[in-house]
Amino acid sequence: MKTLLQIGICLLFAAGFAACESDETPTTGHLVVNSGQAATIFISTEAGNLLIGKEVSGGKFETDLNPGNYSFSSTPGGGGSSGINYFQIRAGHTTVIYNSSTITITHK
């Protein structure tokens, strides 16, 4: 009877530890920028502080950011500017920016 009680207690502890791992709440969001051509992208905070200035050569740029409001602009490889667009990062969500003639922002 004592052995059965010990096994039961061990199983309860194991179930408790397994349940604790799934309670983790994400603290960051994910940003994906799809650039159709070579470009330099700029991501700034809402206050205007530049966080990222990176050249992307016709591919995809991904990074994790803290939740909040940000601005996005890009300079195409041939010059010019896309203007400033604003987006929001939410914890546990992915924000996708498609960089073509217009920018569409979606949350997944």
Image (spheres, rainbow, N blue to C red):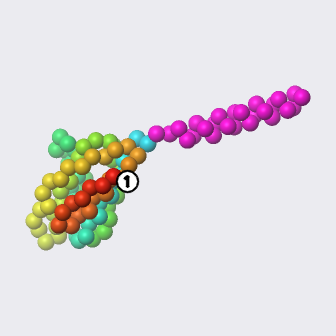
Q: Which residue is mark 1?
A: 108
Residue beneath the point at 29% across and 64% down: 34
Q: As drawn, is 65 to the left or to the right of 76?
A: right
For the stretch drawn in magenta, the main secondary structure is helix
Q: Residue at x 25, y 70 (%)?
A: 36
Q: Position of residue 53 (x, y in %)?
A: 22, 56
Q: What residue is rendered at 63% in x and 40% in y?
A: 18
User: What count of labels does the image hold?
Assistant: 1
Dot 1 falls on a residue whose secondary structure is loop
Give, as a single range, the part of the protein colored magenta.
1-25
**Residue type beneath disc 1:** Lys
Residue 96 located left or right of residue 21: left
Q: Is residue 69 visible?
A: yes
Q: Is residue 38 above or below residue 105?
A: below
- Location of residue 76 in the rendering, given as x and y in whole percent from the top left corner: 16, 67
Q: Would residue 6 be found to the left or right of residue 96 on screen?
A: right
Q: Is residue 78 magenta?
A: no
Residue closest to the far right: 1
Provide residue 48's location: percent of width, then percent of height. Answer: 16, 44
Q: Is residue 15 magenta?
A: yes
Q: Residues within 10 Å of mark 1 (few under 14, many from 20)?
A: few
The quadrant of the picture occupied by the N terminus is: top right
Q: Is residue 54 visible?
A: no
